[in-house]
Image: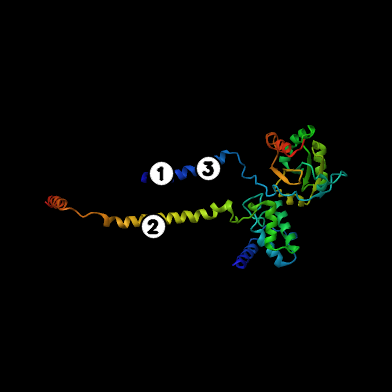
Amino acid sequence: MKSLLLMADLLLGIAAAGAVEPGERLADPALEALARAISSHLRCLVCQNESIDESGASLAYDIRVFVRQRLAIGESNEQVIQDVVSRYGTFVLLNPPVQPATYVLWYGPPVLLLVGLGDTLIWLRQRQSRPAAEPALSAEERQRLDGLLREADR
Amino acid sequence: MRRLLYLLPLLVFVSIAGYFLFSLRSGVNVHELPSAMIDKPTPDFDLAGLSGARKLDLDALKGHVFVVNFFASWCVPCRIEHPLLMRLAQQNHLPLYGIAYKDKPEDAQRLLSTYGDPCRLVGLDQSSDVGLNFGVYGVPETYVIDKAGRIRRRFVGPLTTETVNKDLLPLLKQLGEP
């Protein structure tokens, strides 16, 4: 699954050329592809809604080069990402991690959905059981209804 | 009870709207990100000084409370805070060390020669490696470092008289800078 995502990232990365300049690229194509994939998940803190892979800001350039330097000395994906996060905080990740501060973000919508579903179920149940609970007409009521109907027919 | 239940959506709306209103009026700048470096050891630096001056070496500053200001000659907001820094330097309030971020030595030198140099020492971070290690994402940024060599506070953007009097100077006092 993870490699599939990475593949998709790579294809997207190639389709959109991004802001990577020729001089920044690593000689090893596999490592360069990895750098592109990592970069596409890191927020440019200047533009804030672009990844560093897309951004032309000079800070984005610095972090792209930093990511490549770290990969070149043999660090793993996770280590490289951790290096950036330890300097810039989790806000640098475009995918917010699941941690106490983001519980509402991650679990809020499913909880609301469940509450809504539960409410709907209760409401449907009540509506179904209501007609059965209706008491039948008493003899007196029936007589009066018949009288009214006869009057209307005339 | 039932009737109270019908009020629930309104209550939810009012609390969310109230929260948004409060956030809007609190004056918090969403572009000012919290630093991930607070209470962490200051990243090491050993930078070349300006035109023959001594180099700026973290080891030489260890054991002291000091302030690091990232600035650049191309940075407009830095010009805004510059007179304030000069005033503080003249009153000898600020153990200030400057780091010229992504700046050419001659440009940084020209800036400080023209407008005055509020720093005790200035280091050159042309490659912005030190800036990256500090988590700098724009200039000016100002960091307060304690005697144990930990970053205690970051100020993003130009310092103002208000932040200096309300935050910076009391913090320096608290950290034991006379």
Residue, x 46% and y 45% (percent of image)?
A: B12
- Label 1 and label 3: CA atoms lie apart by 18 Å
Kindly report the distance in space between the C-alpha atoms of the residues bearing marks 2 and 1.
21 Å
| Mark 3 Cα shell of 10 Å, populated few (<14), some (14-19), many (≥20) | few
Tell me if residue A69 comes above or below residue B1 in the rendering: below
Q: Which residue is drawn at 45% across and 43% down?
A: B11
| Amino acid carrying mark 2 in the image | Leu
Chain bearing mark 3? B
Tell me if label 3 and label 2 are in contact, CB under 8 Å.
no
Q: Mark 1 points at which residue?
A: B7
Q: Is mark 2 on a helix, strand or loop?
A: helix
When the figure is inspected, residue B3 is found, relative to residue A111, above or below; the finding is: above
Instruction: Tell me where residue B140 sits by quadrant.
Output: top right
Assign a secondary structure to mark 3.
helix
At a point 82% along the width and 48% down the height, the residue shown is B59
Q: Name the residue under label 3.
A: B19
Q: Are marks 1 and 3 on the same chain?
A: yes
Q: Quadrant of residue A80?
A: bottom right
- Subunit under mark 1: B
Q: Which of marks 3 and 2 is in front?
A: 2
Give the amino acid type for the residue marked by disc 3 in the picture: Tyr
Counting labels gives: 3
What colour scheme does the image use? rainbow
Judging from the image, mark 2 belongs to the subunit labelled A
Residue B74 in percent (x, y) is at: 75, 44
Across and down, in percent, residue B143 comes to: 73, 43
Which quadrant, please, contains the C terminus of chain B? Answer: top right
Q: Do the residues labelled 1 and 3 touch (CB within 8 Å)?
A: no
